[in-house]
Amino acid sequence: MVLTLNGRQCSKYTVISQKIQHPAKKKQHKLLFAVYNSRKNRQYREKVHTMTEKKEKKKIPAKLMVPLIVLGGLLLLLVVTMLIWKVSINIDGPKELTVECKDGFAAPAAEAVFKGPFVGSGGKSLNVRTRGKVDADRVGTYRLRYTANYLWFWKTVSVKVRVVDTTKPVIRLVEDPREFILPGTEYDDPGFTAEDNVDGDLTAKVETHWEENVLVYTVRDSSGNETTVRRSVNFDDPVPPEITLVGDTEFQLLYGTEYVEPGFSAEDNADGDLTDQVVTAMEGEYVTYTVRDKKGNVTVVKRHIVLYDPEPPVLTLLGGESCSIYAGHTFEDPGYKATDNIDGDITQNVIVSGSVNIYSPGSYTLTYSVTDSFNNVTTAVRTVTVEAVRQPDVVPPGGKVIYLTFDDGPSQYTEKLLGILAKYNVKATFFVVNYGHREMIAREAAAGHAVGVHSLTHDYNKIYASEEAYFADLQAMNEIIYAQTGSYSTMIRFPGGSSNRVSSFNPGIMTRLTAAVTAAGYQYFDWNVSSGDAGLTTDTDEVFQNVINGIGNRQYAIVLQHDSKGYSVDAVERIILWGLANGYTFQALTPSSPGAHHHINN
């Protein structure tokens, strides 16, 4: 067999080009033969398919042609099949993974598909088999293999998994409850722990060292991960020394004597006994003790020097420990005097407690108290007796008597009335108010008539507001009477009478007032005959008729009229004539006259 070879050397292979003429088809084919070139033994492996030889030509038997053709077709079919039909495996994720040790691991999912002609556009899904195991609790490199096949079509894909430990250990410090550590003392570490996710407890492997006032803790795990934590330690002495005083912090010193120090001591938590370094000073009412430790902490305490004086003040009641006044009369304290052995005259410091009701007879206690600058207290008591004024005995008039009484004057009609009374030498009683015509009060008294107090204002809401308000009104009107007549009157008539209900806004006021004015020596008069001129009638004839009807067969009659009513004044002369004709005499009221008191309704 004759070969024509043209070779060229390249890398490890020699490519040989051979021209062969096919004996049957007279065509030339160019075949490539790969020949392995070994530098060691220089042996050549050649696979030559000889189709013709130059020296000797021989035909292929016909019976071999068919098998050869079939074999070539099968080979060609196999190559084509491998190119157009295949199995594909898709991994959900990269083919190289890194996971943290102890974090767990789940193999990535995979899908396998067989694709090719006549299979369908999406291909045929295949089951994927996985081989290999990953231990996520141990550091290392692992490989997972995913395999799928369909008939004789196979596919294998590998995934590389690296389990690593990059987590640092954890150092936990036990909290130090101490706010500071005294300088120069050994630090007693309250404790610590070290834990690693892979190596477990590493407490024993913790190393410590100081960086000034910072204690540094360091630990390294088997993977080389290192953790460092720091604890700041307060080396300090902020606690000041303690001074202890012998005796109380408040020292009682008798006034006028010298202070003698009871004693003291000083102790420091670091420096020990500092008693000999205490500095004392007297500052006003205090003794000050000061001490400083080596750290500069200063302590200052004080002892209060309290001067005391056991001798109380002397309190003298002027006028004695008891006195008495008549009801209705103003009480004026006789006075008092207080002196102290140190403070001197302290009369202005006397406090008086208690009160005297001058409108109600009885015994009242006044307490006098005085305190000196050393809180010594002296107390004295005075008893004040309010005595009721003795009322004159009531003397019933002899025979038949008419007492003409006129309220709410003087007025413009009073002068006319005085003329009528003078004409018949009749004496009457005037309970006056402050409505004007004050000069008529003097004329009434000068003519021998009786003058009594009715009211200054005749304002029910004011005069019946309280006992004090009533007596203030009474006394003010009595001052006017005194100014006109030269004497005060003890005879009064309550506005509205003692039985009035206009004072009901102050429950019980009339009960109290009738008793109070009686105790104060006043005589109050009501009436037993009303003329009706205060609202029942304005007719003179009716006024006259009401009076004579009211007198009837009475032994004595106290007639109520108002000289502020002209129609009532016009009836007076007829009343006098009727009384004289019926055996009556006319008299003015006196303190001993009957009062004709009404029933008290309040």
Image (cartoon, grey):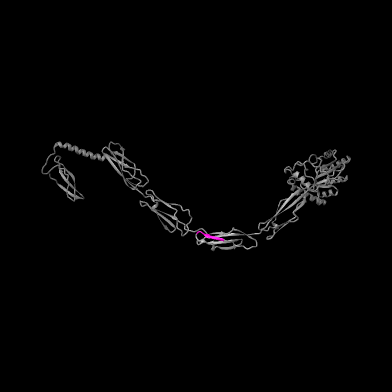
Task: Give the left or right position of residue 424, taking residue 472 as reference.
Answer: right
From the viewer's side, name the closer residue of 323 and 91.
323
From the viewer's side, name the closer residue of 492 and 265.
265
Q: Would residue 210 be visible to someone looking at this image?
A: yes
Q: Would residue 410 be visible to someone looking at this image?
A: no
In the rendered image, which quarter is residue 228 located in?
bottom left
From the viewer's side, name the closer residue of 298 and 68.
298
Q: Is residue 125 above or below residue 268?
A: above
Quadrant showing the C terminus: top right
Q: Is residue 266 magenta?
A: yes
Task: Give the left or right position of residue 470, taking residue 9 as reference.
Answer: right
Numbered-mark total: 0
Quadrant showing the N terminus: top left
Image spot of residue 289 (x, y percent): 56, 61
What secondary structure prevails in the magenta region?
strand
Q: Is residue 538 above or below residue 241?
A: above
Q: Is residue 452 magenta?
A: no
From the viewer's side, name the closer residue of 198 and 401.
198
Image spot of residue 274 (x, y percent): 53, 62
Residues rendered magenta in the picture = 264-269
Residue displayed at 75% across by 43% down: 511
Image spot of residue 339 (x, y percent): 70, 59
Image spot of residue 13 (x, y percent): 20, 48
